[in-house]
Image (cartoon, rainbow, N blue to C red):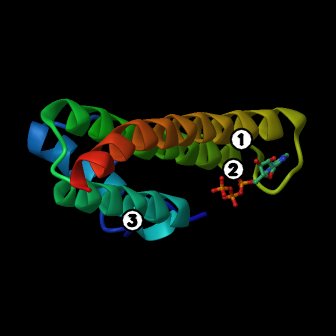
Amino acid sequence: MPMALSDKSKQTGKNRAFRQSLGHAWDGLRALFRYERNFRKHLVVGTVAVIAGAILRLTLNEWLWLVLAIFLVLIAETLNTIVEAVVDLIVGETYHDLAKRAKDIAAGGVLMAAIFAVIVGALVMLPALGRWF
Ligand SMILES: Nc1ncnc2c1ncn2[C@@H]1O[C@H](COP(=O)(O)OP(=O)(O)OP(=O)(O)O)[C@@H](O)[C@H]1O
């Protein structure tokens, strides 16, 4: 799976400036958005939750839980993508039991974060809906 957005930079050494580090981090976010369908899906669900939260006028405490849940899922998906890329880099198309274990565990991490997000979503949105009606 291609991860680099362009070949304009073939840097392999350390970043010399904070601005340079930030640029590469931004490239990483763009790559996530461009190549990872699941990341885009989580982003859409997170955006819908934020819009619903604004409509339902969540309290500060409710916002904190909701934002934590959204970022946890996005970060878990990011780690899953890293594991997939590194495993593919090492084994390529070859089947390997350890490759399967690493990828399945990474996917399990995303599932745990998603379950947490569903629980938080229910605990936050249901009382907020109750206040709305
Ligand atoms: N090299 C490999 N050796 C053994 N099993 C593998 C290998 N590559 C992938 N698999 C198995 O296939 C599953 C899917 O692979 P992979 O994660 O690369 O696909 P994907 O469609 O990009 O997944 P996701 O939907 O999580 O982004 C893995 O969870 C793992 O069980």
Of labels 3 and 1, earlier in sequence is 3
Residue flagged by tag 1: what amino acid is it? Answer: Lys
Tell me, yes or no, whether the two marked residues, 1 and 2, touch with CB atoms within 8 Å: no
Confirm if mark 3 falls within 8 A of ligand 1: no
Q: Callout 2 environment at 10 Å: few (<14), some (14 to 19), or many (20+)?
A: some
Confirm if mark 1 falls within 8 A of ligand 1: yes
Residue 13 in sight here: no
Residue position marked by numbered label 3 in the rendering: 44
Q: CA distance from mark 1 to mark 2?
A: 10 Å
Residue 91 is left or right of residue 89, and the answer is: right
Which quadrant would residue 21 be assigned to in this image? top left
Depth check: 84 or 23 in front?
A: 84
Q: Callout 1 environment at 10 Å: few (<14), some (14 to 19), or many (20+)?
A: many
Which disc number belongs to residue 88? 2
Residue at 24% x, 35% y: name it.
62
Residue 44 is left or right of residue 112, and the answer is: left
Of labels 3 and 2, earlier in sequence is 3
Residue at 51% x, 46% y: name it.
77
Residue position marked by numbered label 1 in the rendering: 103
Q: Position of residue 52 (x, y in %)?
A: 28, 59
Q: Position of residue 66 (x, y in %)?
A: 31, 40
